[in-house]
Image (cartoon, rainbow, N blue to C red):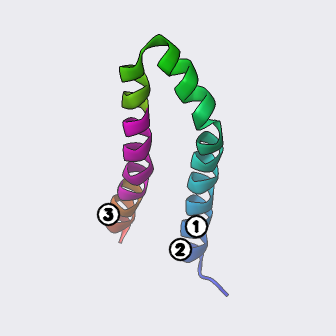
Amino acid sequence: MQDPKTRSAVIAALAILLGFGILWILMPRIMLALGAESPALAGVFAVLFVLAFFGVFWLRARQQRRKD
């Protein structure tokens, strides 16, 4: 059985991956809509999406280290 700390980490990771997964599925529509306005805006959005994916896990790991 998992301890509460491990279970919490698994639930948080699942929620984050699910949220980013849904956004990933919608990404082509978002990129096309933004690209119609400005190709640079679409590029900035793509870069921010990738940075946010890794940033969320980095912030979560940082928070967990502070708790310990």
Considering every residue shown, the one lying at the far top of the view is 37
In this view, the residue in front, 57 or 46, is: 46
Q: Residue at x 41, y 45 (%)?
A: 50
Q: Residue at x 44, y 40 (%)?
A: 49
- What amino acid type is highlighted by mark number 1? Ser
Residue 20, compared with residue 4, is above or below; it is above
Looking at the picture, how far across and down is residue 58, in whole percent? 35, 57
Residue 8 shown in magenta: no
Q: Residue at x 58, y 36 (%)?
A: 27
Residue behind mark 3: 66
**Callout 1: few (<14), some (14-19), or many (20+) C-alpha neighbours within 10 Å?**
few
Residue behind mark 2: 5
Residue 59, compared with residue 51, is above or below; it is below
Q: Is residue 20 left or right of residue 44?
A: right
Q: Element at badge 1?
A: helix
Residue range corresponding to the magenta coloring: 46-58
Q: Is residue 53 left or right of residue 16?
A: left
Going from N to C along the chain, the mark reached first, 3 or 1, is 1
In this view, the residue in front, 58 or 51, is: 51
Q: Element at badge 2?
A: helix
Looking at the picture, how far across and down is residue 30, in whole percent? 57, 27
Q: Quadrant of residue 48?
A: top left
Going from N to C along the chain, the mark reached first, 2 or 3, is 2
Residue 1, compared with residue 62, is above or below; it is below
